[in-house]
Image (cartoon, helix red, strand yellow):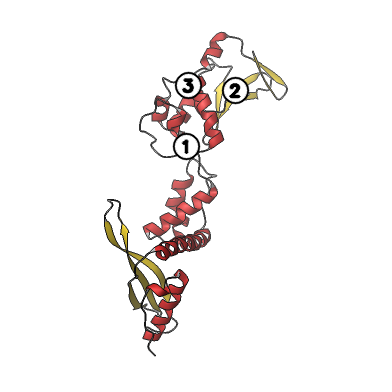
Amino acid sequence: MHYKNKGWDLPLHSEKELAKCKSTVYTFFEAQPEIQFARDHLAEYLLYRCSKCSETIRQGLKTGDQGSTGNLREHVKKCWGEEALTAVKDSTLDKAQAAVRDFKKTWQMTLTLVVNSVTSWFKSFSTRPPEKEKICVVTACWVAESGRSFLVVRDRGFRWLQKEGRPNHYVPSNETIAQDMKKLISRMNWGLAKVLEDYEYLVPIELDCWTSPNHHAFMSIMGRIIRNGTDGQEKLTSVLLDFVELPCSHTAENMANAVEATLKDYGIREKVKISNSK
């Protein structure tokens, strides 16, 4: 049997070598390895590319441990986790390779589908590196839900956690987070508007106003609606309609105008009783 690469032939001259290639550790690497030749034009290493992180791992062909999978196993432990290596231990290589090919096509499978013998080590996380767009959305949601500054993505510790072992991993800038946050807010407002449009009752609102130390006037506009909880019971729920900066101060006219503009944006002007007194 021969592998061909770059015009050279690589003989695998023993059935024992072929048997070694049936190890389930090869499940985690691309099926066809590349070949690295020495200066004497003889094959020196097989180069296996990890199907998860694309790192290349060498397997010697001229040393005493010819065909050893030690380097491959060590990489799998670091990249996929030792539990993953244990999970494929009793699987057949053919079934595992077929599952990996399906994973590459659908881009949605988790390792639970790649190896049937896995238990609960991976749960619902995908083994596919996230796409750039998904990284941006998830990062923006994390920043919002955690009450973090946009500048947190420039933190040295955060960047080390993101890029250590995968230096090409994409980390969005704080400017990108700010832009994505606006998109998420617009999408959230659109969804909330649909909910309020279908709401059959009047919507009571509450206002919270304050002045910042630099004398800017702000106001939050909250709505109260009844929604079904996870337990199926109806619950009174508060929803943030808007957070606005008033043009001058907290006068009744300024507050009423800001509230009316917000209600028109949501299309629920008729569901709220409001009086604008001058």
Residue 153, horizontal then vertical, whole percent:
46, 55
* Label 1 vs label 2, nearer the camera: 1
Query: At 62% across and 21% down in the image, what residue appears?
Result: 44
Q: Is residue 186 depicted above or below 38 in this figure?
A: below
Where residue 267 appears, as percent x and y from the top left, is 45, 70
Quadrant (top left/top right/bottom left/bottom right) for the N terminus: top right
Residue picked out by circle 1: 127
- Which residue occupies the foreground of this view, 21 or 229? 229
Q: Along the polypeptide, which appears first: circle 3 or circle 1?
A: 3
Are the residues tagged 3 and 1 within 8 Å (C-beta)?
A: no
Q: Which residue is mark 2?
A: 45
Q: Is residue 3 left or right of residue 268?
A: right
The answer to whether the residue labelled 2 contacts the one labelled 3, judged by CB atoms less than 8 Å apart, is no
Q: Looking at the picture, does residue 150 appear above or below residue 122?
A: below
- Relative horizontal placement of residue 238, taking residue 23 as reference (left or right): left
Q: Secondary structure at mark 3?
A: helix
Q: The residue tagged with tag 1: helix, strand or loop?
A: loop
The structure residue drawn at horizontal position 53% and vertical position 38%, both measured from the top left corner, is 107
Separation of marks 3 and 1 at Cα, in angstroms: 18 Å
Residue ID for mark 3: 24
Image disc number at residue 146: none
